[in-house]
Every structure is written in structure tokens, then in C-alpha cells.
Image (cartoon, rainbow, N blue to C red):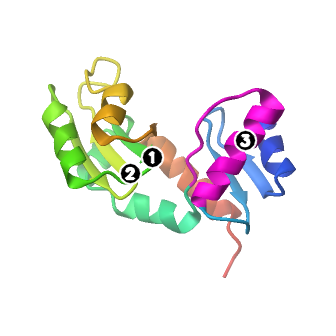
Amino acid sequence: MSDLRDVCGGLGFEDARSLLQSGNLVFRCSAGTGAKLEAALQAEAKKRLGLDTDFFVRDAKEWKAIVAGNPFPKEARSDPGHLLVLFLRDAPDRKSEASLREAIAGNERARTLGRQAYIVYPDGVGRSKLTTALIEKKLGTRCTGRNWNTVLKVAALLAATSPSP
């Protein structure tokens, strides 16, 4: 994670902080949009670290909307470890979302909102047939997931690093 923080520093991002070893970074940056930042991070990580991976950037306002827009508040309270937010490269269309729902063979429930998918895995992620590969295929876009506990920890980190009004 310190190497990833250094990548951010090398790009001129300020106050880069990481959340444990979760792959989540919070930083300040005034240059570019989410897509531009993602491309810059991907290129710099490959150059500096030999790491070929996707980055999914959301700003503080988007993160607050992700938390507020959770369509599964009951599950967030009762079983946050089994509620995942998938951060999508692109927002899927209705047909793709319907295809994802049709692919659910177990007790999972899924809902997409913009460039996020919220999925409840009541029987656990490890046993589920609703894998990342299947989700990406059905939605037609790349993704990465974080459980609700991690989403809230990132929200707290964002709040702690945001300038006061």
C-alpha cells in the first residue's frame, strides 16, 4: 500500500492515504475526471510497480451518494459483511441488469445504480455461483467489489481527510 501511495504522490496527488491493505486509496486531486485519473493511475502503477490492474475512482460526493443510495439498508445493518458494492467501469443498461438478475441461481439479490451494483450474498460470497467473472460478463463491464464494512470505513476516511467547510 505504501507503493500505491507513492504512485499517487508521483502523479501530484495530495494527502494519499490507504485503508489497511484493502487496495483503497483516498487522496486529493484537482486534475481530471474519474476516467482520466483511472487511466493515469493504471499507467503509473504499471510503469513504477509493474502492476497491471484496474483502478476505479470515485470522488467524495460520489462516495456519499453510494452510501446514501444503498438499496439494501436492512442488510447493511444486520449483515454488512455479506453486502457488497461492486464499482463498475461503466453503467450497465437495463437489458444488462436484467441479464444479471436472470443469472442469479441462489439467494443473492442484486441492484445496479449508475456505476455501482449492490449485491446481497446471504449465504456468503465464497459459495456463490454469482462470481465477478459472471457479473462482468452479464453487465458488460469490469468491476471490483468491497463489502459494506469497507465502504463505510472508506467513507469515514474521506470524512477525516476532507477540508472543513
In depth, the one of 159 and 14 nearer the eye is: 14
Q: Residues within 10 Å of mark 1 (few under 14, many from 20)?
A: many
Local secondary structure at mark 3: helix
Q: Marks 3/1: CA distance? A: 20 Å
CB of mark 3 within 8 Å of CB of mark 1? no
Q: Main secondary structure of the magenta part?
A: helix
Res. 75 mark: none
> Which residue is more in the foreground, 9 or 48?
48
36 to the left or right of 7 = left
Residue under numbered circle 3: 43
Give how far across and how far down residue 89 sits, in percent: 47, 47
* Residue beneath disc 1: 87
50 vs 152: above or below: above
Where on the picture, by quarter, is residue 86?
A: top left
Alpha carbons under labels 2 and 3: distance apart: 24 Å
Q: Which residues are magenta?
A: 34-57
Q: Is residue 35 visible?
A: yes
Disc 1, disc 2: CB below 8 Å?
Answer: yes
Residue 49 is left or right of residue 95, and the answer is right
- Mark nearer the viewer, 3 or 1: 3
Q: For numbered disc 1, what is the local secondary structure? A: strand
Q: Residue at x 59, y 59 (%)?
A: 34
Query: Dot 3, crowdedness within 10 Å: few (<14), some or many (≥20)?
Result: some
Q: Which residue is mark 2?
A: 116
The x and y percentages for residue 80 are 36, 41
